[in-house]
Image (cartoon, rainbow, N blue to C red):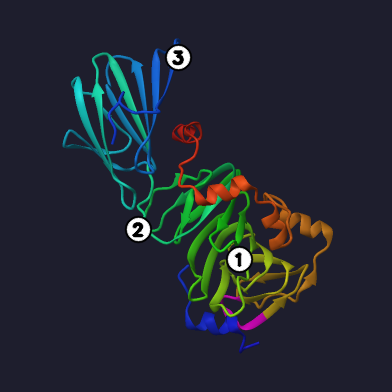
């Protein structure tokens, strides 16, 4: 199949793998008699969320922590280093705090330091609107999962409702699993202990163009790709592992990168085309319920039918056993759809726990 559209596109382009404490309307205050701690949760005018904790304690009067960590913290015009920072010599009175990190929104915030009181300021940073192409939202989340924006070295915990961007690197750990609803209504379920990169994702409804390229570094993910409309241009949608590239237009399938040397693929709906990254001249077509393995420097294996036990093994660790785009979309609730549209950082209790993991 040397003239297939997948081989053609692969040969043409191959991608490398501010508020003042005590003056906020609507803030929540809770007291703990056992620790003498007062917590005020503040929703900033920007998408970032700020949490202030007061504790009766001597020494270390000011602590500033951010999620993700590593942000530059400036206190009263003096740089204090990368978060988390502890300012042990802060005098009582107004304190101006500025936080900056790469493609994240800068924060300017004023608090009042008090004698004998430790103030801890926790900030959940949000990315700048222009920091990349937004492509979807996290609508399901269980366990531990993290994301790392392109051109950064700091990872941060994923949370429900988080917007994902082109270039994001997503990982799950332990029993972590997530589901992403993309803006074109395609869905990707990421299984436990998996690394996924959104290498490219562009959809232009007016021009009828869609180009997607996702990379499964290791682990397992199920893909439910919306065919969109007839007449759409572009190289459609591709998924890559260390050994294989799958080309699709509108279909459902599971990719399992078992190791850096072996990839297994099962097609659930319609057809997908598979090549070895080292052997683009030898393509294999997988139909529904067919399986193929791709090993280093070898053409994809001859497709075979997946028996129930084999299909169950592919689906293990995923948050859905759906076998079609229609099935997975039927699982999306009105609350999931609101998450896709809302610009919210998630429940404060959820993200505050992330600081202490």
Residue ID for mark 2:
130
Question: In the rendered structure, which segment of residues is drawn in magenta?
Answer: 276-283
Residue ID for mark 3:
32
Tell me what residue is drawn at x 60 percent, y 58 percent: 188
Residue 344 appears at what percent x and percent y?
Answer: 46, 43
- Please state which of the two labelled residues, at mark 3 or mark 2, is closer to the viewer: 2
Q: Tag 1, which secondary structure? A: loop
Q: Tag 2, which secondary structure? A: loop
88 or 32, which is in the foreground? 32
Tell me what residue is drawn at x 33 percent, y 43 percent: 70
Q: Is residue 205 above or below residue 326?
A: below
Question: What's the distance in space between the residues labelled 2 and 1, CA to CA?
Answer: 37 Å
Q: Is residue 233 above or below residue 53?
A: below
Question: What's the distance in space between the residues labelled 1 and 3, CA to CA?
Answer: 54 Å
Q: Is residue 294 left or right of residue 307?
A: left
Residue ID for mark 1:
261
């Amino acid at each position: 199949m040397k003239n297939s559209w997948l081989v053609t596109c692969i040969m043409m382009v191959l991608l490398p793998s501010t508020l003042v404490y005590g003056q906020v309307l609507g803030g929540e205050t809770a007291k703990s008699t056992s620790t003498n701690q007062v917590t005020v949760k503040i929703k900033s005018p920007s998408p970032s969320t700020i949490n202030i904790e007061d504790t009766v304690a001597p020494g270390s009067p000011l602590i500033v922590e951010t999620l993700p960590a590593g942000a530059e913290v400036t206190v009263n015009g003096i740089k204090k280093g990368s978060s988390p920072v502890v300012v042990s010599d802060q005098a009582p009175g107004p304190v101006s705090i500025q936080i900056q990190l790469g493609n994240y929104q800068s924060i300017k915030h004023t608090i009042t330091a008090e004698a004998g009181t430790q103030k801890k300021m926790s900030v959940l940073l949000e990315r700048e609107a222009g920091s990349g192409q937004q492509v979807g939202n996290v609508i399901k989340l269980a366990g531990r999962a993290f994301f790392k924006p392109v051109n950064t070295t700091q990872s941060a915990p994923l949370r429900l409702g988080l917007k994902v961007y082109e270039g994001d690197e997503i990982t799950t750990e332990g029993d972590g699993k997530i589901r992403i609803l993309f803006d074109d209504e395609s869905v990707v379920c990421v299984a436990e202990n998996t690394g996924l990169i959104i290498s490219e994702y562009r959809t232009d409804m007016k021009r009828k163009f869609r180009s997607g390229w996702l990379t499964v570094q290791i682990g397992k993910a199920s893909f439910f790709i919306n065919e969109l409309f007839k007449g759409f241009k572009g190289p459609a949608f591709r998924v890559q592992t260390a050994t294989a590239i799958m080309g699709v237009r509108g279909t459902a399938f599971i990719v399992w990168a078992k190791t850096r040397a072996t990839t297994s693929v099962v097609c659930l709906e319609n057809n997908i085309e598979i090549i070895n990254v080292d052997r683009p001249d030898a393509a294999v077509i997988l139909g529904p319920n067919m399986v193929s393995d791709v090993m280093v420097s070898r053409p994809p294996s001859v497709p075979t039918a997946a028996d129930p036990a084999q299909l169950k093994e592919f689906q293990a660790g995923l948050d859905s056993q759906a076998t079609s785009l229609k099935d997975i979309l039927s699982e999306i609730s009105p609350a999931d759809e609101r998450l896709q549209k809302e610009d919210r950082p998630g429940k404060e209790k959820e993200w505050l726990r992330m600081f202490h993991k």
